[in-house]
Image (cartoon, rainbow, N blue to C red):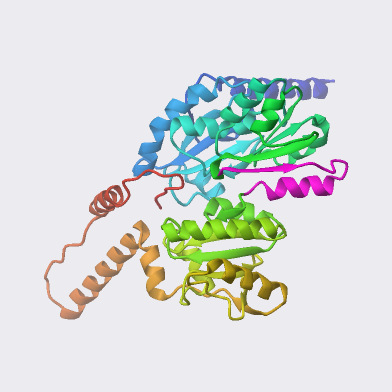
Amino acid sequence: MTMRVSVVFSVLLLIQFWSGEAEKFSVDGKVLILDDSNFDSAIASFDHILVDFYAPWCGHCKRLAPELDAAAPVLATLNKPIVIAKVDADKHTSLAKKYDVDAYPTILLFNHGIPTEYRGPRKADLLVRYLKKFAASDVSILDSDSAVNTFVAEAGPFFPIFIGFGLNNTIIEKFGIKYKKNAWFSVAKDFSEDLMVLYDFDKIPALVSLNPQYNERNTFYGPFEADEFLEDFVKQNLMPLVVPISYETLKLVKADGRKIVLTIVEDEDEERSRELTKLLKAAASANRDLVFGYVGVKQMEEFAEKFDISTKLPKMVVWDKSDDYLSVVDSESIEGEDQASQITKFLEGYREGRTINKTFSGPSLMQFIHRSFDIRMVYIIVFVVALLILIQSFSKGGDEYHAVPNQVQVDRASSSVSEAEIKEYKPGDKED
């Protein structure tokens, strides 16, 4: 009897303890301060929580902090609130190690306790619009023209939008759940012919996909009974016709089962590259069994040079997302006037099997050093210089004193360099 009372009492104490921990966290619109003692409890307390792993000396972190402060009260008012928190990863190194934080800021979004790295916008208003997706319904029910237009406007440009006109919401509900992190899903129950003209479909039922960021629209008229065809349409429209390759879009591309026709250009922002993209869109529309993408050497040199960029650019390859890729015989470079014909020739050569299998090439030593010259290199160089000076001192046998920069001096030098290096504040900016 005494044993049972003791066990019950212990359980009650545990319940009281955990309840007390949970009560410490409230959705009050303020950024939570987390550490080793309360981190796990905070993650367990909220369905959605965005955690900023920062370092006090990090310039990007300092610019991010006021944006998070401004976004927090807005996100707290959502029907399903999203909480913002931060961790001093420079101080709480065990948490940083647990979540593989090796550069600052690292921002993780925990959805029901599962972390994914946040690579969206960092300005407060855009951050709010981006994060609303994760707290939204799997499928939104729209009952008027104005409801449809409002839904599209509030969804913003960050994710594709799927609207089922004249569809039962159960038909696309499974995809709304499966692809919740990647797109908005909705069903319009009542709408006018004017809306049909606006969204460019002429019969129902229809599933319309919108990609506001790339100004693309596609319509699927069925069959809706076969999940295979419907899911193919959804997957194909999660990405634009021609995908600009970045660290963010690589995740989407790799998750797709199709091979990638990758075009490598010098600079994707040049006018000639934009014109080439238009030609690639036409090819992509006619070859939906392949993903079409492009990457600029200027924008992602480390990735682009894996495909042997010593040949003339622009060039095309077919990549299966492994360490191997295919080059088409006599069609690798598409430099010249009639690029449309060269793209057609490349695709015909690939279809006919006139290909050469190649393996990723590694960066040259100088390119690697150039890319890797960051704060860690500063410390390494200081260490090597100090070591050489020490060896030289011993070899001379003299009593001459050699001054070596101390840690504070190195930190100050590193800080001044980092602040001057990057003036523009962009998503994904980090410091090691």
In the image, 11 versus 135, the foreground residue is 135
Residue 194 % position (x, y): 67, 26
Whether residue 343 sits left or right of residue 34 in the image: it is right
In the image, 144 versus 264, the foreground residue is 144
Residue located at (48% from left, 70% from top): 337
Count the labels in the image: 0
Q: Would you say residue 394 sits in the magenta stretch?
A: no
Q: Quadrant of residue 48?
A: top right
| Residue 160 at least partly seen | no
Residue 325 % position (x, y): 62, 72
Whether residue 96 sits left or right of residue 328 in the image: it is left
Residue located at (55% from left, 65% from top): 263
Q: Would you say residue 217 sits in the magenta stretch?
A: yes
Residue 285 lies, with reference to residue 88, above or below; the image says below
Residue 5 % position (x, y): 79, 20
Whether residue 302 sits left or right of residue 190 in the image: it is left
Residue 219 % position (x, y): 72, 42
In the image, 414 versus 274, the foreground residue is 274
Q: Residue furthest right?
A: 225
In the image, 17 versus 105, the foreground residue is 105
Residue 57 lies, with reference to residue 384, above or below; the image says above
Residue located at (50% from left, 34% from top): 127
| Residue 182 at least partly seen | yes
Residue located at (37% from left, 59% from top): 376
Quadrant where the N terminus lies? Answer: top right
What's drawn in magenta, residue-wise? Answer: 215-239
Q: Quadrant of residue 381?
A: bottom left
